[in-house]
Amino acid sequence: MLVGMSSTPAEAEPIAVDAPPGSAAEPLMTQWWLDLTFVHWPVPPEAVAPLLPPGVRPDTLDGVTYVGLVAFRMHRVGWFRLPGVPYLGTFPETNVRLYSVDERGRRGVVFRSLDASRLIPVVVGRSVFRLPYLWSRMSVRRDADTLTYTSSRRWPGPRGAHTSLTVRVGEPVAEPTALEHFLTARWGMHNAFFGRPVYLPNAHPRWPLHRAEVLSLDEDVVTAAGLARPLGEPVSVLYSPGVPVRFGLPHKPAGIPTP
């Protein structure tokens, strides 16, 4: 039978700065995201709509959506309530992401690429979760208030697609702006699994955010992900020391057949 059929998509839910109650209460995965830098550029919604999976549309703020380049350290990925893995579950990652909303109004992100330095997690992410993980040479270096993230893609390609990003961390953000909430308060991921849309919820404490300044940026992973090269300076650059994260079991959006 069909459940929850809707003739028109729901409006996007209000932006919530905290995870929805009960979100990811029974974790599928746990992990830490550490030393994150968020770099964002505005893009027209019509430019990214063809890049989104079925059942979702671009999420917008004042008629604009965004492409994000997010670099960080993944730490101790674990399954269910088991302890995180110290070596295979710990590695640098850099992703290119878009902002999405599904037919139920749930806001989320769509990953266009996820560069990571451990081959086994890349293979698992690609084969089990159908996520665009890519194996890359990567490093994260810190010198006082300056962080440098580097990556160079190995497999499956385009080989050599790279990121070199250096930022200086500034003052803590006392009260994030509406845009900063829009870009960081995301409690789920939209993806396609064997052609069907799925929503994977996540939960973590409220982000501790800092202002940040790009000192240098050389990358071509945004264009490798199918987007036009961003023009001009990024409109938002933020840093977070990190949060512990739980992912819950995937949800099928409304209108998907169930046995």
Image: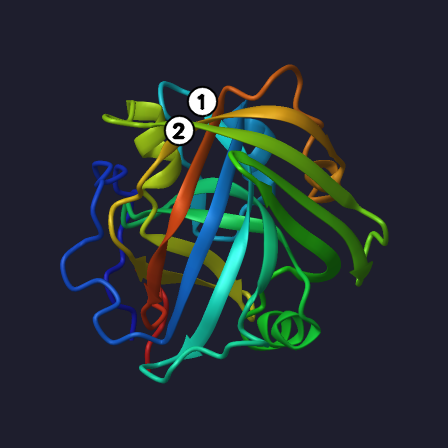
> Which residue in the structure is indicated by mark 2?
60
Q: Quadrant of residue 4?
A: bottom left
Quadrant location, the C terminus:
bottom left
Residue type, mark 2 in image = Thr
Residue 34 sits above or below residue 165 on the image: below
Q: Residues within 10 Å of mark 2 (few under 14, many from 20)?
A: some
> Which residue in the structure is indicated by mark 1?
64
Seen at 41% across and 67% down, the residue is 31
Seen at 55% across and 65% down, the residue is 195
Residue 194 sits above or below residue 157 on the image: below
The reply, left or right, for residue 40 in relation to residue 149 is left
Q: Mark 1 to mark 2: distance in Å? A: 5 Å
Residue type, mark 1 in image = Val
Q: Position of residue 57 (x, y in %)?
A: 44, 41
Q: Quadrant of residue 245?
A: bottom left
Name the residue at the top extreme: 232
Q: Position of residue 220 (x, y in %)?
A: 76, 37
